[in-house]
Amino acid sequence: MDYTEPQFFRVMQYAARADRDVVDMVSGNPDWDPPEGLRDGLRDYAEAPADDYQYPPSVGLTPLRDEIAARRGVDRNRVLITNGAGEANHLAMTGGLHHFDGNEILLTDPVYPYYAGRANFVGTDISFVPVDERNRLAPADVRAAASDETAVIVVNSPNNPTGAVYDADAMAEFAAIAEEYDALLLSDEVYDHFDYAGRFSSALHADSDHVVATNSLSKTMAITGFRVGYAIFPPEDGPTGALLERARTQHMLTNVTGSRPAQYAVLRALKTTSPDYYAACRRRLEDRVDDFCAALAEVGAEYNRPDGGFYVMARFPDFPGSFENVYELIDEAGVAGMPGEAFGESRRDWIRFALVTPRVDEAAQRLANYFE
């Protein structure tokens, strides 16, 4: 697969040109309201004095970093606020390549295409480790694929697109492999609030100097447009402390800093949002997973029931997950999903559907009508 161009927009643009109504199940944009505290924070910020409309610290607002550090059990100095998790991942990947001796990034197959796109962008070598029959990345397979050429190992839990969730034992093994081969474990944990199996464990719990954990508030608070993410680097007084200083510098040279009002509003939401908000979001997604998977079963499709995240992958009889077939579903069924071939080789016959639309039941019925 060519990862030099954004594959998601390729499908979204085709759907936008369709001469019919199409249910968008491509993008991961939550369709529910953000926490009320976030709106309150924005309203209050509008009346802030002029000084609060100027640059915030490049590393992020201190109270926001304090709040994140307290929640993640780390020192504030390890927290860098970024332009979404995308920038956080980029800083970690390029930092790992710069710091460690290898020139290879290990990625999961299927892979979130932007990881591979970033690796292509910096011109490094890529190796893919296929998931097992449970859609999980087996630590033994990662160890078998790793070598002295490995600089970065990327793990995403809960996973996009498979919905796999890794527990503390698996994360500890991934971190141990990174240490063994003197590489970086990059753990993208952006879907951590959407764990239905109760299995999720942050890579930070491995307490390793070879781990960077990234996250954002985009999915958690349904604010993908705010672009508030963060990375938690190893302590700067440790053996891999140069990772943090390089990331701060690269972040400043690229962005100067992040959005002050967005960070202000996110901080207010973190401090005021009840656990009930997050629980309701999970229940909403679990209900959609139930309904969508039941509809897939009725038409004889094979599917994965995700343990986390909000994506379902499905394989329809004699209908591989190619771009051409996805375009056919758009034109003939009015449902837009992502082709499996966009995520790699191991699930190229599958199609990924994002359940972040109130029209999940309608989409399921359209697919049922098309494949019956």
Image: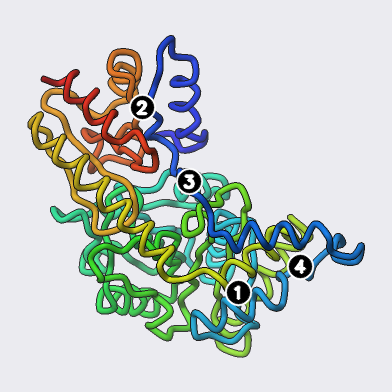
Q: Mark 4 points at which residue?
A: 58
Who's the residue at 15% across and 56% down the image? 134
In the rendered structure, which disc, 3 or 1, sits on the residue that comes first in sequence?
3
Few, some or many residues within 10 Å of mark 4 (<14, 14–19, 20+) = some
Dot 2 falls on a residue whose secondary structure is strand
Tell me residue 137's x, y (percent): 25, 60
Q: Which mark is residue 243?
A: 1
Residue 150: tell me if it is visible: no
Q: Looking at the picture, which amino acid does disc 1 mark?
A: Leu
Q: Residue at label 2?
A: 336
Instruction: Look at 10% across and 37% down and name the residue there.
Output: 297
Going from the N terminus, do you reach mark 1 or mark 2 first?
1
Task: Please say whether residue 212 is visible from this viewpoint.
Answer: yes
Q: Earlier in the sequence, mark 1 or mark 4?
A: 4
> Residue flagged by tag 2: what amino acid is it?
Ala
Which of label 1 and label 4 is nearer to you?
4
Q: The residue tagged with tag 3: helix, strand or loop?
A: helix
Of mark 2 and mark 4, the one earlier in the sequence is 4
Answer above or below: position of 129 versus 356. below
Q: Distance between the residues labelled 1 and 4?
A: 16 Å
Q: In which quarter of the image is the N terminus?
A: top left
